[in-house]
Amino acid sequence: MERKEYTTGTLIRRFWPYFKPYRGTLYRDLFCAALTTICEIVLPLIIRQITNTALEDVTLLTVRMILGLALLYFVLRVIDALANFYMADIGHVMGAKIETDMRRNAYAHLQQLSNTYFNNTKVGQIMGRITNDLFEVTEFAHHCPEEFFIAALKIVISFMILAGVHLPLTIMIFVFVPIMTIVCRLINKKMRSAFSKQRNQIGELNAKIEDSLLGQKVVKAFTNEALESEKFEEGNQEFLHIKTDTYKIMGLFSTSTRVFDGLMYLTIIIGGGFFLMDGRILPGDMVAYVMYVSTLIATIRRIIEFAEQFQRGITGIERFLQIMDADIEIFDDPDAEKICNPKGEIVFNNVSFEYPDDHNKVFTNLNLVIHAGEKLAIVGPSGGGKTTLCNLIPRFYDVSAGEITLDGKNIKKITLQSLRQSIGVVQQDVYLFSGTVYENIAYGKPGATYEEVMEAAKRAGADEFIQNLKDQYDTYVGERGVKLSGGQKQRISIARVFLKNPPILILDEATSALDNESEYAVARSLNELAKGRTTLTIAHRLSSIRNSDRILVLTDEGIVEEGNHDMLMEREGIYYHFYKMANEMK
């Protein structure tokens, strides 16, 4: 996966639109943040008033005055409690909603990405980006505007109040703020890099775990449990190393802020002490100074502590945007039209193709006409481009040059949805979703009734074995259909295509991994499925394509032979040698 780099400003600017649907909630949250800030800032003023009044003349300190100030503070604390509850409850819900919106957008974008993206990206990395990374965004979305808004209010209001009490001492204290900001920014850059490495390594670790667990049968068959544990430990130790470096940076960050804390308090002790000696500041003002500086330092420390969460959130947003900015290579042209009930004539006109990631050339100026309703078989050596040719028709990849037409219309001018709805694909490697038999067959036509699913299963020759399963159509098939045999999975995939009922059919080595009995049952189902449809069959077992209307021999030089079985056998060319070799191996 290509890792694009973004500045913090760019990330925040790209993230900000996610607040738009929740602007009302955000503004109310910030209003509550302002209320809690005011409640906190008023306390030093109350203490200052009581202290200075007592020192000036203790008789002026009346019960009425004390109770009045106490009542004021009590009301402010009630307001503070209510405002804080809103921030903790509704504010966090807003963050969770933004996280949900981002995850929805990321998933929708992933659905539009081409095979090239998934061929070059580990599933564990993708999973990490749309789950764990976005967990941090909830806290970021809630706390980022809130924390910075509170900090700005406290710094500005504290400065104004303290400047009104004693400007020179205030300037002496606040001169540390910009210096502290610069130091924090420098360390923050290192922290963000560390968190980015940490997130990436977690994705790598997830990918290794997923790879090992999905291949656990192979691991056990080769008794390589120790090897897998060693590979896992290597990644696990790398993650520990990265996390150790992260904590060092965080320690440096925390230590630097404590140094500045000490310098501010030292300034108050020395400067405030001398100003008290000269009578240029009152004792009550000095107390207020200490309280305000304590509040200021607590605020800065809170921002510093939030910096870790900030960097986690920023890293999560960055990794999210790396998905969102992945190019959608295959999309509908602006003038693309929906196609309905195509006849199924497919024409390749001077088609050239190379894979976009490694630029490996597969075809150059390939020409081919597939007639509507024709049963076309494609054979040839591995790497000759048989599967690639078929993948170009539903636009799993786009041609590099030339064009492919369906019923005379360039497939790029047909909407992807209607094009792919017109094509049914049965592959050698059947993918069944974790769920029931019914759910997997109904995937060919979402919302299909049980009657429709059963009819499709009967036509695919699958109903008989399904009826013998424990819960019949409600039987759970396990992850990737592990509870079913290869032949059973294949017939369910054929039933799925029967339910879809497309006019064009692509059979990509659909029986090559099956035993003889399963192959015979599946072959009958495929023959039934192919009736009345334009059918492209890729096969290594040449006996299964003898009755095809036309057979192509495809090599890295293009189409080198073409004709029906009898014609190609008479020529005694490549097909003849393939067929003889297959018979000798029986």
Image (tube, grey):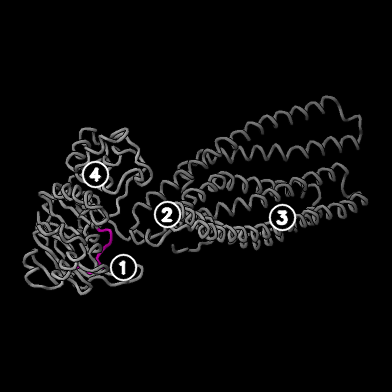
Look at label 1 and name its amino acid. Answer: Tyr
- The extreme right residue here reads 277
Look at label 2 and name its amino acid. Answer: Gly
Look at label 4 and name its amino acid. Answer: Arg
Q: Is residue 209 left or right of residue 172?
A: left
Q: Is residue 178 left or right of residue 219?
A: right
Identity of the residue drawn at 58% across and 47% down: 145
User: Where's residue 42, x and y in %?
Assistant: 74, 38
From mark 2 to mark 1, how far is it between C-alphas? 27 Å
Q: Quadrant of residue 365?
A: bottom left
- Mark nearest the camera among 1 and 4 is 4
Q: Which comes sooner in the sequence, label 3 or label 2?
A: 2
Identity of the residue drawn at 11% across and 68% down: 562
- The vertical placement of 355 against 302, above or below, is below
From mark 3 to mark 2, how far is it between C-alphas? 44 Å
Q: Which mark is residue 254?
A: 3
The residue segment tinted magenta is: 395-402
- Quadrant location of the C terminus in the rendered image: bottom left
Q: Which mark is residue 355?
A: 1
